[in-house]
Amino acid sequence: MVRIINDQVALVENVDIFTPIHDDPHIQGEIVACNATNDVFAMGATGIVSLQAFIGYPEDMDEEIVVGVLKGMNDFMMQFGSRVTGGQTIRNPIPVFGGICLGVAHPDDIVYSRGAQPGNAILLTKPLGIQPAMRSYRDLQDEKREALLERFQESELRTMQETAVRVMTHSNRVVALAMKRVGVNAATDVTGFGLIGHADNVASQSGVDVVIEEVPVIRGTLELAKFFGHRLDQGLAAETAGGMLVFLQPDKVEEFQEVMRLHDLPCWTIGRTEKPRATPAARLAEGVKFVETAFP
């Protein structure tokens, strides 16, 4: 949500709540904070005012877990000169963690998911593959472990999981800074609706077709996703605290990627926009290329 306060100040607020994805409380807290702040950064706000925590947990859960999650959230926020400033805690049959993030920007710097134009280049700032990587994290701990290890090496699965954690705990603030410096037409983060789902939202709001020609994925997750039945090869697997889709003029791509390189971060050109064939929509191009990669 964006609220224009005056001609100099706009407030950007986002709420994200989800079930735990990692057993380490501190890491889980970092993921929560990263996920909550990413929507604010996707709208071009680079100043983070605060994060309010939302914690729901059952009566029999050790409160030290809650403390660890809150510490992870607060430690993550400190990199922005901010912190967890309060929140709400409730009893709930299953644990749920989330955050309400408040950011600030100049109204002229706000970036919306509408605004993409035909002929834009499309950038993606993090590889996909969180869903299968973290599914394997769970399956290695229960009765599905044996079946999983009949197909995959445990060391390979652990590498995928570690990469996924790095993706989920790396802030998108540098992307927001690059958008502010370069100037872009539209942007969105990539989370629960997957690459095509979020791209389709931009397409429908902007009145363009989005054509995805190349998809970076965490090394090994494409085959893992097929094993689980996740639709990563269709661009439909869910992500958590994923990267950002950025739509901009082609002559600005090099400058944008240079900003990312200065921070040792990757940035892939994954497609283009064009005039719609019919109803504006996103699609994978015929012969789309999947690129397996690591993440810093």
Image (tube, rainbow, N blue to C red):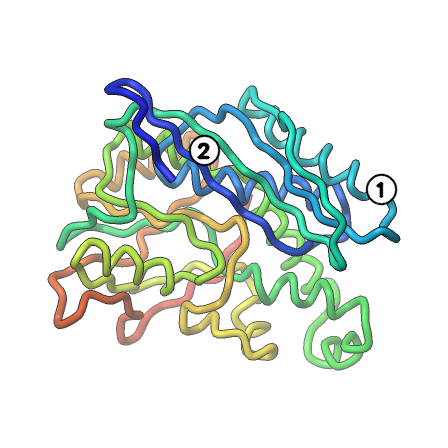
Residue 144 sits above or below residue 116 on the image: below
Q: CA distance from mark 2 to mark 1?
A: 31 Å
Q: Position of residue 153 (x, y in %)?
A: 72, 70
The label number, if any, that marks residue 63 in the structure image: 1
**Residue 202 sits in quarter:** bottom left
User: Residue drawn 13% across and 66% down?
Assistant: 276
In the structure shown, which secondary structural element does the residue marked by tag 1 occupy?
Answer: helix
Please name whichever residue, 74 or 173, is drawn nearer the observer in this view of the structure.
74
Residue 19 left/right relative to 294: right
The label number, if any, that marks residue 218 in the structure image: none
Query: Closer to the observer: label 2 or label 1?
Result: 1
User: Residue drawn 42% across and 36% down?
Assistant: 41
Dots 2 and 1: beta carbons under 8 Å? no
Q: What residue sits right under mark 2 in the picture? A: 173
Residue 83 sits above or below residue 214 on the image: above
Q: Position of residue 143 (x, y in %)?
A: 82, 77
Please name whichever residue, 90 or 234, is drawn nearer the observer in this view of the structure.
90
Please name whichever residue, 123 or 294, is drawn nearer the observer in this view of the structure.
123
Mark 1 Cα-neighbour bin, 10 Å: few <14, some 14–19, many ≥20: few
Residue 176 left/right relative to 24: left
For badge 1, the amino acid type reads Glu
Residue 119 sits above or below residue 235 on the image: above
For badge 2, the amino acid type reads Arg
Residue 210 left/right relative to 227: left
The C terminus is located in which quarter? top right
Mark 2 Cα-neighbour bin, 10 Å: few <14, some 14–19, many ≥20: many
In the structure shown, which secondary structural element does the residue marked by tag 2 occupy?
Answer: helix
User: Residue drawn 28% across and 18% down?
Assistant: 8
The N terminus is located in which quarter? top left
Residue 25 sits above or below residue 52 on the image: below
**Residue 249 sits in quarter:** top left
